Image (cartoon, helix red, strand yellow):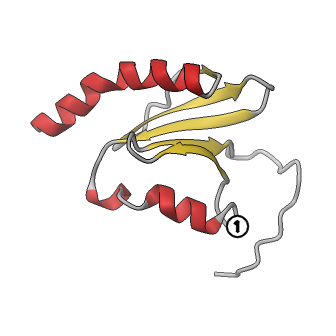
Amino acid sequence: MIPDRAAWLNRVPEILRDLEHRWSLTLGVPYQDASCAWVAPATLADGTSAVLKIGMPHMEGEHEIQGLRFWNGDPTVRLLNADDELGAMLLERCDPGQHCARCRKPSRIW
């Protein structure tokens, strides 16, 4: 394993403890298919469903948080909270096959 990636992996438990406390999260079992991030379902203190994603530092993810802020949920999931230094994102949960509770009309058609 590349040393930078090993160092990042070693920090993940500490980052999780910090974010669970700071953002008042209850974390579920991490998703198994994430390749460049630690990703798990989360529940906020008010019961809101979300997803916590901690991105491993790499070129392709360098501007992910800024991009999600720019799109602001249209046509992406909403960024509920973020820590740029940690590469941590608290995202609106979007489960495959789940009907939207509120139908958002995208302003752009691709």
What residue is at 27 percent from the left and 59 percent from the top? 59
Farthest residue in the right direction? 102
Farthest residue in the bottom direction? 109
- Tell me: 48 left or right of 34: right
- Tell me: 39 left or right of 71: left
Q: Quadrant of residue 110?
A: bottom right
89 and 49: which one is in front? 89
22 and 68: which one is in front? 22
In this rendering, is residue 10 above or below 70? above
Q: Is residue 13 visible?
A: yes
What residue is at 76 percent from the left and 72 percent from the top? 106
Q: Amino acid at mark 1?
A: Asp
71 and 31: which one is in front? 71
Residue 68 location, x and y as percent?
A: 56, 60
What residue is at 45 percent from the left and 58 percent from the top? 64
Residue 63 location, x and y as percent?
A: 41, 62
- Tell me: 52 left or right of 99: left
In this rendering, is residue 39 above or below 25? below
From the image, tell me which residue sits under label 1: 74
Q: Quadrant of residue 104?
A: bottom right
